[in-house]
Image: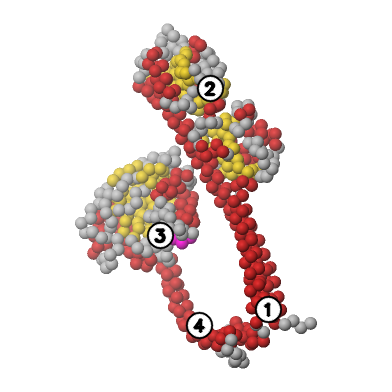
Amino acid sequence: MQISIRWKLIISIVLPLVLLSVIVFWFTIDLIYSFAKERLHEQATDQARHYAVQLDGQFQSFAQVARSTASFLNTQPELAEQQLYELLRANVTQNPLIYGSAIAFEPYQFKKELKLFSPYVYQDNSGIKSIDVATESYDYSNGEWEWFTRPRDLGHAIWTEPFFDTGAGNILMVTHAAPFYDKGKFRGIATIDIPLDKLQQHLGIEQAQEQHFIIVSPTGKFISHPDPELIMKATIQDRAILYEDNDFKQVSDKILNGETGVGVLKKANLMDMNTDGSIWIFYAPIKSTGWSFAMAIPESKMTDYIRTQLSRGIIGIIVMVCLVIVCILLVSTHLTKPIRSLAAAVNQLGQGDLDTNVSDIRSSDEIGQLANGFNHMVEDLRHYVNALTKEVAARELVENELRIARDIQMSLLPRTFPPFPERDEFELHAINEAARHVAGDFFDFFFVNDNTLMLVIADVSGKGTPAALFMAVTRTIIRNLANTGESPAQILDDANKLLIESRTQPIFVTIFLGCYHTDNGKIIYANAGHHPPYRIGDQGTISKFGEATGTIVGMLNEARYENCEGKLDPNESLVLYTDGLPDARSPEGNRYGQENFEILLSTNAVKAPDELCKIAVNEVTAFQAGNLIDDITMLVLRRNK
């Protein structure tokens, strides 16, 4: 049976369109849903981490009360009994969540004739009360009470495991205990007690109160749980045995290990939630106490908005496909014999025949206009192809030259990492990403003697080829001057004069130049208008390393530079960077910002220099959707010993 062109057109377009739409749609929906779930995991994990940090801050403030009391007793060993009770009363009244505070003296340390003395002030429903634990409750020095023996033996403050304090409180509590001394001799313990029955209602994370969450101790005991009956009466290990679920065991192990992450439970129900589907568990450590925080959210609740939006998208795409099919049916009614000639000409053109034209269509309707337009288009296309061929050849030549220029530029920078594998007293890594083919940023490092490592990071104004050329000249000048043994400030002063003498364009450069002594961690540096580096402490603290000691290089004849001195202690890092990191812009125009950069450094403080560089560049590049608006350069130095 012969099929008309109309139906051939309908069959050849409609069926592939429907099939392709279904395939693309199904793949896209699956991809979007998977990506959205990953983003939800990240957001909820960040939320759990945020809650854990909030809790950590609160417990640090509680701990500070005990530590401050101990520090005060170190300096005031002769306080009278009444003064001690007044001090404890001040501790208890400053925060409603502090149940009690005690000072427990080592035997015979308060008075020579008195073996034990431990004033204790606490608050209950009837008000604030005071007792002497030693005479009214128990012998805290007999080795049975963790809050006294552990900090005494360890020599530092601790958070205890939750316990029931019979006699001195008669409640479930957790204690922070700090030792105090007299001329180096252990004298006693200062404590604050936090009641577990109030902990669930007064955690200070109001957003989490509408969600199910738990807090577990290092041994797995539930410190906080939606079911009050499980607090201090069950452990997360008990629940793992109860459910006999491998996913639950893995999640519970990670929670007890103090990790941060997400897990999906399909069978087990960690927090007794009323749901039949999968549950997402997000967890993070409370570092100051050694506890862990975990939050549970049903997957159906987390993905409800996504599924709603996808359903709307499905309806929209179905409507669109139907409209396209209707349009094809309408158009196909009018396209008959003349279309074959036009299709044949198009086919010839598609095969590369630029001499083809349509000569047998004489109508003045749309088909005729299309035929005339096609003939004009082919003629214009011939001219365009000829011009494009020449343009492509010229563009390939330029791009090839730019690629060579980038290769040459990269060869000027250190490329081997680790750069000094034989030196174990420090680690060093750097990275440079160009916003265009070539970059105006650069970094450098080199030894000027066995114990002195020069560190350089610079940012030339502007981007592209002019900045890259200026960068190469600046790098060469600094290298040459550094080998003369001059100080960083003198090197910048000499470099400023040389660059001004040879300057033909108003280009300048900001430079941080440091002289790092590998034997003691001392850094003598000069900062010519560059971003101050960051110091990462051995505990993950972030602080700025100095300030600018002079203005930009290559612009002002009267510019002067000064040396400053700093030091890296063991396990501390120095982070040098250019403004391409904090000044990054998202496609929506939002600035990445110095605060986000500091958070990134703090979050990844324990990472090795190479990992920290890669994480920072990847995050900022992703923030800009891969379209860098400025060069990115980062150098990280960590002192090992």
- Whether residue 535 can be seen here: yes
Q: Earlier in the sequence, mark 2 or mark 3?
A: 2
Image side of residue 319 versus residue 137, left or right: right
Quarter containing the C terminus: top left
Residue tagged 4 = 385
CA–CA distance between discs 2 and 3? 56 Å
Q: CA distance from mark 4 to mark 3?
A: 36 Å
Residue at position x 48%, y 31% in the image? 59
CB-based contact (under 8 Å), mark 2 and mark 4? no
Please tell me in which quadrant of the rendered image residue 414 appears.
bottom left
The tag earlier along the polypeptide, 2 or 4, is 2
Under mark 3, the amino acid is Asp
Q: Secondary structure at mark 1?
A: helix
Answer whether residue 70 is visible to the viewer in this image.
no
Q: Amino acid at mark 2?
A: Glu
Residue sitting at x 56%, y 33%: 215
* Image spot of residue 76 (x, y percent): 35, 19
Q: CA distance from mark 2 to mark 4?
A: 85 Å
Quick check: is 629 in the magenta stretch? yes
Residue indicated by mark 2? 146
Q: Which residues are magenta?
A: 626-634
Disc 2 or 1, which lies upstream in sequence? 1
Residue at (26%, 58%) from the top-left corner? 496
Secondary structure type for disc 3: loop
